[in-house]
Image (tube, rainbow, N blue to C red):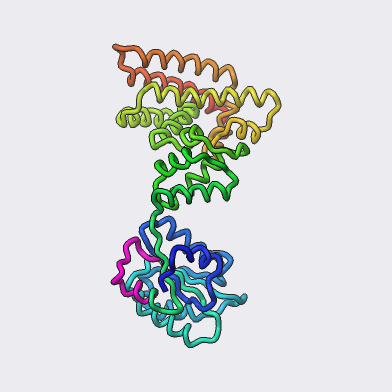
Amino acid sequence: MKLAPARVDGFLRRPPDDIAVALVYGPDRGLVRERCRGLMTTIAGSADDPFRAATLEAGDISGDPARLVDEAAAGSLVGGRRAIRVRDAADAVTAAVETCLDQAAGSTLAANLIVLEGPADLPPRSALRRLCEAAPAAVAIACYPAEGGALIEEIRRHLDAAGVRADRDVLVALADRLGADHAVMRGELEKLVCFVGDRRQLTAEDVSDCLGDGAQASLDALAIAVTEGAVAVVDRACRRLAADGVAPVRIVRAVQRHVDRLRMASLLAAAGHTEQAILARLRIFFKQQPAFRRLQGSWPRAACQAALDRLFALELACKQTGIPAEIVLRQELLTLSREAAGRIRPSRPR
């Protein structure tokens, strides 16, 4: 049968015992993968369970149709239904799937579940899609990107499940920024939930600070490279950001923010705060925490303040007319990076 959108969530939570095949397809590839993995977990307890779960490639089945038939008929050594996932499933596996459906129809036992991970474009005339939409023991689940109000509502549900609140204007801004790819949206929302922490209220400033854009991610990487003494990385990043048209002042301020956080970390450590409390207080994004931990001991308060003084002077220089701001910026950041390398290298284990 062709499963209506309103029935999909209920089916994913509890697939009926008499359903032997679930075809999941559509242009939202993140949602396709999530639903396939969810079905595997629901049936087998884990998508990686060696006794109750198996994963096949469509190419293997098209060359040997009996392989899918054998997997679908195999019983579990520990009891319960088994789940068989077929990646890149398209019309080439139709004959094997039809044989499995015939076997399931002739059995009095609960059928194992074959989860077909279909392509982005599976037209109505597709033999596999027609089979799954018509067979009583099969379902076809289409995964299309949410748009407009539906996308906003989906974002709200994700945040609600994590216990995070957001005003309507923030939800609208998120919908515009994240787009409709489910995997991308889920990953970015998880990042925001971690960023908000115990405040549990998401603001527009949080979205801007945490997600930013591609240039912001490059700026964060550059700031870390400067303080780690990665001179070659700094040189490449400065040239790339300049080629992308990122303003020199924006680059300087990104490094300033990072160094100021290191300064604050030094102050908090001196006041007796634990490392984990410092990371939480400064809201260091979890992917940046390992680098931040490594740097704290090499950047005492005096070194941070001296670097900040130079960065503030650099910002003023970049704002002056008649000077090559990009060249001055790169030279000063390279100098800071070389000095950091000299300070950090002796403390590194040999």
Out of 2 and 44, give the one closest to the viewer: 2
Q: Residue 232 placed where, x, y %?
A: 39, 30
Which picture quadrant has residue 296? Answer: top right
Q: Is residue 209 magenta?
A: no
Q: Where the N terminus falls, by quadrant? A: bottom left
For this view, does 204 lie left or right of residue 80? Answer: left
Which picture quadrant has residue 274? Answer: top right
Q: Residue 83 placed where, x, y %?
A: 51, 71
Q: Residue 228 placed where, x, y %?
A: 49, 29
Out of 176 and 266, give the one closest to the viewer: 176
Quick check: 105 above or below 193? below
Q: Residue 280 placed where, x, y %?
A: 61, 34
Name the residue furthest right: 272
For this view, does 61 lie left or right of residue 47? Answer: left
Which picture quadrant has residue 323? Answer: top left
Please report the residue visible at 51 percent of the width from the left and 47 percent of the height from the top. Answer: 156
Q: Where the C terminus falls, by quadrant? A: top right
Quick check: 313 above or below 270? above
For this view, does 15 lie left or right of residue 125? Answer: right
Quick check: 177 above or below 297? below
Please report the residue visible at 45 percent of the width from the left and 32 percent of the height from the top. Answer: 220
Instruction: Residue 56: tell me if it is visible.
Output: no
Out of 220 and 171, give the one closest to the viewer: 171
Instruction: Residue 98: tell me if it is visible.
Output: yes
Out of 291 and 345, give the one closest to the viewer: 291
Please report the residue visible at 56 percent of the width from the left and 75 percent of the height from the top. Answer: 81
| Magenta region, residue range | 117-132
